Image (tube, helix red, strand yellow):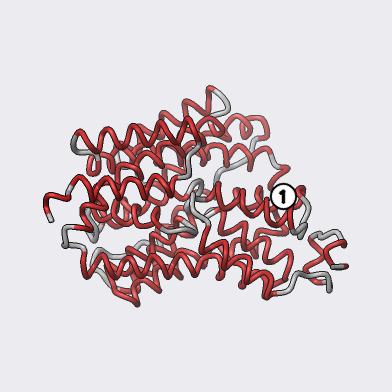
Amino acid sequence: MAEAEVPLNADSVSSANKVSLRELAGFFLRLGTTAFGGPAAHIAIMEDELVRRRKWLSREKFLDLLGASNLIPGPSSSELAIHIGYLLGGWPGLLVAGICFILPAACMVGGLAWAYVHFGKLPEVPAILYGVKPVVIAVILQALWGLGRTAIKTTYLGFVAVLSVLLSVFALHPLLLLLLAGGLACLPHLRAQRLSLSALPSLTISSAALATATTFSLSSLFLIFLKIGAIVFGSGYVLLAFLRADLVSNRGWLTDAQLVDAVAVGQVTPGPVFTTATFIGFILGGIRGAVLATIGIFVPAFILVAVSGPLVPRIRKSKIAGAILDGVNVASLALMAVVTWQLGRASIMDVVTVVLAIASLFVLLRFRFNSAWLVLIGSVIGLVTHAHHY
């Protein structure tokens, strides 16, 4: 108990004042197994358990790590877990916390993907997804509303958001859209400080170099998810825009209906939203595809957390970096809005699904209801509605 009384800071990683790896593994395994509700819920549980109850780190340090996670691409709650693991347990803690948080959800999603592939044509599964899909759309809209109120801080950022929606409708690649929005958002600051954007083209080229051919292979699947894991900013739901662009529009490996199914399965399980990659990987390449897609999408998070830690204090103090991040955030919301519209057309098709989507959205916004329970209710409604087909 004496260790808990020593204030933890960045230097504690190399000192003897560390939480044991067994304790880290136990906590993050339980979190990854039981934490429904998406990134916001994961973060709230970590704060309650690790700051208030266990006092493993201070609230100020927790906020610093949360801010660091939001400044880099990738799944924010997973990166927060990795940051905490590194702070409390060094390099072994970084791996233990991240893997233990991700692995339970990946295994659950993989199991559901197996059932989907083998039994997906039975009447019960489409019935369940019939009720779940409208709830998923409502969950995304609720997240979009909450994030939008925070991200669109000025009229100028509102203009960037509207422009991003229009460019997304006209099929500008999501990565290019994020780069453009970040550049536009920092223009006022650049004008004042006369900085150059010469680094942006090289970033575009390096990202484009990760693009793969339209012919399916396990290596191309891995590279696609590696690219997505390295460039997706904002909420995990922005992942949908990149998945649709790469796997539905550009390569035709998935249909819109399959993509919505993947997201629905991700909502049924706890843990990171990015385990949607596990589901898609299994559909396209079996067990090996699921493993490669999961590794590909999460590896960048481990690398970015390890590399960005020493740079975070400088980034947070930079007005230019902050402005770019503001632009990236509003563009992320624009992508979410457009992809939600596209997916909604494939999910909301009759009176029942319209009512279910509207009711779910009302409950989420008005009562802050746990989305996992809504997903369960939606599945029951789907089964009851299609009972006469059995």
* Residue behind mark 1: 64
| Foreground of the two, 376 or 231 | 376
The spot of residue 253 in percent (x, y) is 23, 61
Label 1 SS: helix
Is 363 placed left or right of 313 in the picture?
left
| Foreground of the two, 54 or 43 | 54
What residue is rendered at 50% in x and 37% in y? Answer: 368
User: Does residue 201 appear in this view?
Assistant: no
Whether 271 is drawn above or below 360: the answer is below
| Foreground of the two, 317 or 144 | 144
Whether 338 is drawn above or below 176: the answer is above
Amino acid type of the residue that numbered disc 1 sits on in the rendered structure: Asp
Whether 277 is drawn above or below 189: the answer is below
The spot of residue 346 in percent (x, y) is 22, 43
Is 66 placed left or right of 185 in the picture?
right
The spot of residue 303 in percent (x, y) is 58, 66
| Foreground of the two, 331 or 240 | 240
